[in-house]
Image: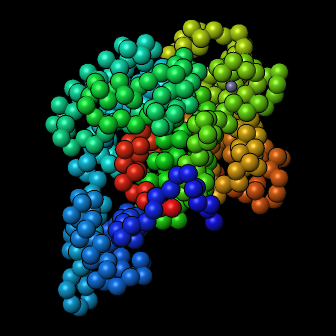
Amino acid sequence: MRKINTCDFRVATRSTSREINSRIALNVIHEHQPISRADLARRMKVTRGVASTLVNELIGQGLIYEGATGDAARGRKPTFLHVRTRDRFVVSIDVRFSRTYIMLSDFAGRQIALEIFDTIFDIGDFIKNLGNRIRRLLKVHNAEARCEGIGLVVPGMVDYRTGHILNAPTLGWREVDVRDKLAASTGMPVHVENAAKACALSQMWLSNNNPTSAQSFAYISVSDGVGVGVVVNGELLRGRDHIAGEFGHMPLNLDGPRCMCGNNGCWEAYISNLAILSRYFGWNLSKRSPKRLKDAERSSFTVLDLVARARSGDSKAMAAVLATGRFLGLGIATIINLVNPDCIYLAGEITTAWDLMEDTVREAIAERALTEAATRTPLRVTSTQEYPRLRGAAALIAAPTFAAPRVA
Ligand SMILES: [Zn+2]
């Protein structure tokens, strides 16, 4: 039950029902492809004629295509329908504290080319450099005409409507415009979003044909910082000021280690990659200046190395992994208590140690979750996926194709 907003609505027109049914058809095809017209009609509970009309319309719009012919016991052989993704391109950009990643991919997030360079912190220089790289990338792959946009994600808060980066503590960017400047430099539509929110969008729209995928979930990305994208009833939670989901900065301990946001004891200060390495090496996180943080980020020893040491019997490394697991679980329990999602997705380097720390994480959740049922919230590790944040950036361009039309 959703209240109609009398200050912001869309009145239904004669074409509204057609528009809705066409999007339903597109989504059913997306989740069940390859699928025949007959099967589509069955799943939509409409007649073959209605399904065929919708299919012809979607083919005409270039959103789906007819593929191979299937087998039929008798009568005409069915042709299978697929969503058109392979010849529709998107440029995705993941700006991180240490490096910036640019990927050219198709609409399903399949990688065509990847470039990595040291992040440039001066916005003017960054846009100029990025614009040059994007133009070159599209030219080399002869993709200018087929590229439908640029998706860019940052570890920080973004006003999705204006494309302004409100605050990205690790990058030192506050109130900066990237969207319009990059659009002017490349001549292409640009969407900017918080990295974890974009990952949540990608989990919703680009994950492999999974019709049973959750409608309400939290996507937790543990990396340089901690980002959380919250989806409730199929819609990304943004909040009035676009800071919804900043669970990385909920306090676990008011006297805890200093966080990049300037406060003490945030969840992020206990589980970020730097916090994990600090735990192992005995660094005092509160006393590390941004420059030294940067050196640590670029040093050759990473969380993946730490996990490898834990596996090879280094007891200090194992202790660091387990302590991190406990703090991870305590934070997840709070998210479960506040959002009560269908499931939680986890991504980031430390999740490669999932088999080592799962029991510790679950014990911490059991300690804090408010009901017995809540302690059993499914946890799904997505670390097997390559470059989830770049897929998230690609989803910014590809996902709107599938979204429900706004009515009322
Ligand atoms: Zn913080």
Res 390 quadrant in image: top left
Residue 86 x/y as whole percent: 25, 51
Q: Quadrant of ligand 1?
A: top right
Q: Residue at x 69, y 21 (%)?
A: 259
Looking at the rendered image, the quarter that the N terminus falls into is bottom right
Among all residues in the image, which is located at the extreme front? Answer: 7
Quarter occupied by residue 405: bottom left
- Judge by depth and name the residue closer to the eye, 72 or 9: 9
Image position, residue 202 (x, y; %): 46, 48
Left/right of residue 346 with respect to residue 22 in the rendered view: right
Left or right: 363, with 347 as reference point? right
- Left or right: where does residue 265 sit relative to residue 137? right
Q: Inspect this view and state whether residue 345 appears.
A: no
Please state the total of marks drawn on the protein image: 0
Q: Residue at x 28, y 83 (%)?
A: 49
- Note whether 16 is above or below 262 in the view shown: below
Please name the residue shown 32% across and 22% down the image: 130
- The residue drawn where x is 43% and y is 56% is 403
Residue 208 versus residue 159: which sits nearer the camera? 159
* Position in image of residue 128 (x %, y %): 31, 17
Residue 149, image x and y in percent? 31, 39
Is 137 located above or below residue 328 in the figure?
A: above
Q: Is residue 82 left or right of residue 378?
A: left
